[in-house]
Amino acid sequence: MPELLQGAVGKRVADHVYGHIAVLGRWPQALRERIERAASLARVNLGEHVNVVKMHALGEQLSLLAYEDFDTAPFPTLNKSWRINLETGTVVYRDYADSHNPPILHRKELLLPPDDPRIPGYMALTLTAETLGLFDDLSRIGFREQWLAHIATQGYTLRGAEFIPIANVEADSNVFPTAVLGGPIQRHLTALSRTNLSAPVKALWRHGLISPERTFFDYGCGKGDDVRTLCANGIDASGWDPHFRPEAVVCTADTVNLGFVINVIEDRDERVEALRGAYRFANGVLAIAAMLASQQPPDGRIHGDGYLTSRNTFQKYFTQVQLRDYIELVLDESAIAAGPGVFFVFKDKGLEQGFLQRRYSARAVQALQGTWLRMAQVARAPTERRVHEPNPSREAAFIAAHQSQLHALWLAHVELGRPPMPDELAPDLVEQLGAGSAWAKLCRIATSEFDDEPRARAARQKYQDLIVFAALKLFRKRQPYRQLDVGLQRDIRYHFGDYQALQSATKSLLLELNQPERLHAACVDARARGLGWLEDSHSLQLHTQLVPKLPALLRIYIACATVLVGDIADFDLVKIHVRSGKITLLKLEDFDASPVPRLRQRVKVKLRELDFDLFDYGSIAYPSRLLYFKSRFINEECAHYPEQVEFEAECERLGLLSVATEEPSAAAFFASLDARRWEIDGYRLVRSRSAPALDAACGRHLTYRHFIECGETQRRTGLSNLPRQADTYTALYELAAHVLDPIIDYFGMIELSYGFCSAELAREIPGRIAPALDQHAGHELNRHSKPTCERLGAACDFIVTDEDMEEVAIWVAANTPFDRLYFYGKDCPIHVSYSSTPARQFVRMTMNASGTRVPRVDRSVIVYG
């Protein structure tokens, strides 16, 4: 299968390949046959139900994916997925329709055939995101909520297919009278209180133009949040603002920021002076940011070359090109785009050249400045010709004038799961709507004006909630309808008509509790919506915080257990046994904080016997167990879900865990971590910071003592020769695991003639050695706290008794991921190293006429990879 994937055009993520259905015709026939068989098993049609295919590198597995609005959405959300195992014929279906945090898709252009006409537009968006540094941390972008939050940390918000700088964002204009207020324009009202750095300051920071060695001045700093944040991070920063900091001293600085100032100045001459004034105070670079014109029409009334808002503030909107041209016209200097609505102007031309060199060497795809701007223009839809429209109806005029109030009414509908009544809303909102006797009509208008899916989803959830409520009432003394809360009475009337109808529906559902096939069907439905892990057909296990989203039948089933053991909120996981009439509740240590939490308590509730068994873990009788693959029992709406998925993928990649093998004990798992030089830090695997015992295993066949106490000089001097850096021990392990273990497996035990070399040992070795090049020093530091050998990694010299070392060397080069290999002769030890950045160099040490060994790279030898 991996060989087939090598010829597939598409987006590669780890060992998987994603392709849009438009590219499948370019894939090998064998892959297309697998996809067609998978679609048949899932009972879906490519193009109709599925628009993306994900091929898994290992095993006979693939996924069929349905992304919503692939063509028009900038970052489409995953709506449905089918994961098919062709070997077993099984299909796992997942529906994300009810998820508040579905997976999203980036870099759409990579999924398409190279000649697809959609690529330029999609690539423009990708290049803009790259410019903003949004792909620098891939662990934060896989799900919608994390993606939007990540965009916000970079100082932007996503509006349609545009990245808009977060600055001078107007409060909801409909909260205020629609007429523009009199009096002077209130520029200071545009200042924001920030929790993150603004877009221009973030861009300066990202490109190294803000640092402890450079002074920073914010010209028009508003409330000063950028300045405070920079000062807290050790930056010499100050700022001035005519309203909030008029007394501050305006001074020159290496880096000056003019962030979202020129767009709030209504006087054109004053706007020019602000831009020139800021540039005068910049010794090195000036950053300018302004509001961009969205494809949506701006709010407010035309005033000069901008708009007056309902708060009597002014906004001048630019296009990206207009902003660049305006800056260059006023300053007579080149303006370099650093992001949407952000430009740099360099006074220090040497600094400018350094910036351009770093920028373009890091992003070879941007061969020319402004490429992404031109492509963004390609991506924009053509402007439609204005046509004369008739005067709007009274209802349309009302809707246009009361968007905010109608949206608030719609939100209340979503929150309640039914149309709200006037007394359930704020009095001023009801007054602004002028409800009178037309309340039902207002609710209808609000429902039709906004997205119906959240409202329908809320209604379905409320219906289920009411049935669970009624079931719990049946378990106890039933409360008369007249004693119920007024809001609850309204819920019942809206969804069921009357109390009796609710009780009848509830009793019918209770009869299904003794039908395993109905419980199983409900479990399948729950799993399809990402609620828990369904193990074959006998149990569903999930986090207790997901229980309220389960189908009513399962919630009632679980509620039966609470009659005996109390609130399930005291537990972390609940396991529904479909056929045995049991519920298991699990309590784990640090469930939210640990990717492999320890089991502390298990309660098995036997519903048929009305009894339960309790087991406490952590003793000899019941040793504590770890919960592996925790992501199965939570979903994308739970805390740390992306980090959990990434942690598990890393564990599988490193061979620490596997879904196909038996789960290790806690002791075995941590012993494996320790042996491979890994530690768990939060949700990350990091390299161990401790020194292992010398006789601890280093790979499968050697110990650390083999590397440290070897060689003629070490034996003669008796030096301890111990590494000082924990990373050196890790490098020795990597050398043993990746290079020496395969050699020993193939040729038998080796004899080390030279291993780790400390600075003390190096001084005792006669003859010429090269600690700065040979990697025998591992990750040790010199007296300047710099690596002794900048190549890092680790190296050793070894020989295999009774073997032709040239044959050994050639085999090593072809079959191991070595870094550098030095061959000295058929009966001499060979030098081999391993590092995270392998050079794959096979070097022959040949003797010249004067008897000196000369290194020559032999490119004829077949090397690994």
Image (tube, helix red, strand yellow):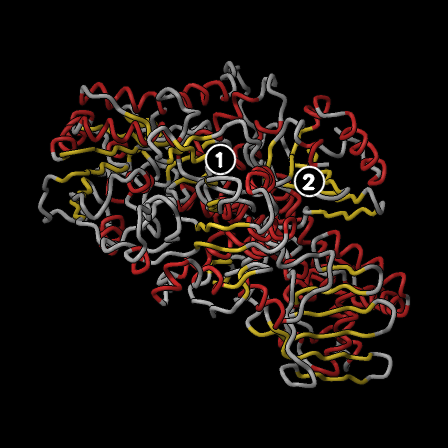
Image spot of residue 566 (x, y percent): 68, 81
**Which residue carries the number 1 mark?**
842
Residue 255, image quadrant: top left
Assign the C terminus to one quadrant of the image.
top right
Callout 1 amino acid: Phe
Question: As rendered, which of 854 and 691 lies closer to the eye?
Answer: 854
Viewer can see residue 99: yes
Tell me if label 1 and label 2 are in contact, CB under 8 Å.
Answer: no
Viewer can see residue 186: no
**Which residue carries the number 2 mark?**
57
Mark 2 closeness class: few <14, some 14–19, many ≥20 residues within 10 Å:
some
Label 2: state its secondary structure. Answer: loop
Image spot of residue 859 (x, y percent): 50, 28
Q: Is residue 571 above or below residue 217?
A: below
Question: As rendered, which of 850 and 800 lies closer to the eye?
Answer: 850
Say which residue appears at 11% left-offset and 48% top-offset: 248
Question: As rendered, which of 136 and 403 lies closer to the eye?
Answer: 136
Q: Earlier in the sequence, mark 1 or mark 2?
A: 2
Residue 533, image quadrant: bottom right
Callout 2 amino acid: Ala
- Of all residues, the one furthest to the front in this rendering is 850
Q: Answer left or right for 96 relative to 314.
A: right
Image spot of residue 763 (x, y percent): 28, 56
Badge nearest the viewer, 1 or 2: 1
Image spot of residue 857 (x, y percent): 45, 30
Question: As rendered, which of 807 and 416 lies closer to the eye?
Answer: 807
Q: Is residue 78 above or below residue 371?
A: below
Label 1: state its secondary structure. Answer: strand
Say which residue appears at 73% left-offset and 59% top-offset: 661
Q: Disc 1 and disc 2: Cα gap in Å? A: 31 Å
